[in-house]
Amino acid sequence: MHRTLRVSFAALIILFLFLPSFRAEARMVSVGLSIGQSTVRISSASAMTAADGAGKRHSIGGTAEFRAAGAGTVKTGNHSFRLPVTISGKSPLSFNGRRYRGTFRIISSGAGITLVNVLDLEEYLRGVLKMEINPAWPQETVKAQAIVSRTYALRSIRQNNGKNGFDLRDSVLSQIYRGINAEDKRADQAISATRGVVVLHGGDLAFTPFHSDSGGATADVTNVWGGSMPYLRGVSEPYPVSSPNSSWEVRLSASQVEDALRQAGVDVGPLRDLRIGETDAFGRANTLVAVGARGTQSVKSHAFRMAAGSNVIKSTFFSISSRGGTNDSMPMPLPLRSQTPSPAGGGGKDIPTSNTPMSAAEERQLTALTEQGVFNAEELMDMLLNPEKRKGYLIRALRTRRPEAPSLPSQPQSSSGGFVFRGKGWGHGVGLSQWGAKTLAENGWDHKKIIQFYFPGVTLGKM
């Protein structure tokens, strides 16, 4: 009897010693704010403390500029620290005009330094949600977005596994994160009400992409990024959605379309016709057929859209009129926002890998190219999931620099050579439609029902 009690007591000690710390670590995230710079300048409303791995601690006042000093060290004022350095304070820390919760960490990045924000996952979501959805929308919609964003972050963290010294970026490479500046009481309520809740499939974290407006029916992941996930198949929305992109029209010249086709890997020479090839069950274009002087080729409509510009061709739910509007390639389909990367990074099979750390200059180049929209959604996710490919993507981008998305004339350049795209929705179309979720909530659906509609077969559970 007493032995059993001793064993149980020992088990409880192990439980209390190890489980809480594991759970605390599992809830912490690290976000890269500034990558590979020579200096970073931070501040706070109260005095900050800097501590390095060697145990050195110093008060550094309310403002400090850290400079890379080589050999794994940084300097600020008269103080020198061994990297990594943790900065904390009683007041929120500030960088680049934005305030952040948690602590800052400065780590080595080639010849430069990288600034990382370390904080609790739920606090991180407070800086994300307003950047991804309108918090004034129905609370059930905002709750659904909170759960989807939480799951998306956790799955990305697991796949990235802390490579490069942090879990997530603060940009579209992960989710847009702006710290305290982006916090909103209504978003906070949704995060608090769903604390720890995630989307699960088969007992594991689901991949939860989202977009602005599906146009009436979502897309199957197979037709957008390839692969197959049973909970990422197309579904038809039960209510009509009214959004700023419920209908749109854009006109491109033949040369603009030819440029986009070449960027998508199709070159048929001078273009004679462009028409819809395969469609899904809801009428969304899966493929396009390009007819030119050098033959006929098929291309994924998603690949064409990304090459033409995702803000130009707003979704793949469109019809095409060519030759001055005399040839409608398909009837108008049923009535997409953040370009969520693909789950498998399918576009990077030919990219070489490298385990050599990128230099600070290379990191800056990659960041600049990303901000310019050089990489498409598949490539961004491939870099997130496979950091060893980042240098390969950079090299390819510098060698084959894509031109910027074509500018849009108000009219076709010629009545016989222009193409008119008329469509509905905005975004890639996979997963949760934000405007659709808003409409469902307005019709009485709760967040659980909304998520299980857009991700059929999933369950909700605590992390």
Image (spheres, rainbow, N blue to C red):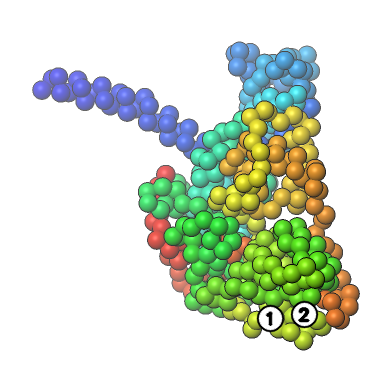
Task: Identify the mark nearer the N-term, 2 or 1.
Answer: 2
- Residue pictured at 74% horizontal, 69% vertical: 295
Task: Determine whether label 2 and label 1 are within 8 Å by CB.
Answer: yes
**Position above or below: 391 against 334:** above
The residue under label 1 is 329
Q: Secondary structure at mark 2?
A: strand
User: Hey, what amino acid is under mark 2?
Assistant: Ser
Of all residues shown, which one is farthest toward the left?
A: 1
Residue under the image location 60 percent in, 17 percent down? 53
Image height check: is 193 above or below 73?
Answer: below
Q: Position of residue 296 (x, y in %)?
A: 71, 70
Quadrant housing residue 50: top right
User: Mark 2 highlights which residue?
Assistant: 322
The x and y percentages for residue 267 are: 76, 62
Identify the image quadrant of the N terminus.
top left
The label shown at residue 40 is none
Q: Residue furthest front?
A: 294
Between 96 and 356, the one nearer to me in the picture: 356
Q: Is residue 276 visible?
A: yes
Q: Is residue 306 above or below residue 276?
A: above
At 23% across and 23% down in the image, what residue appears?
9
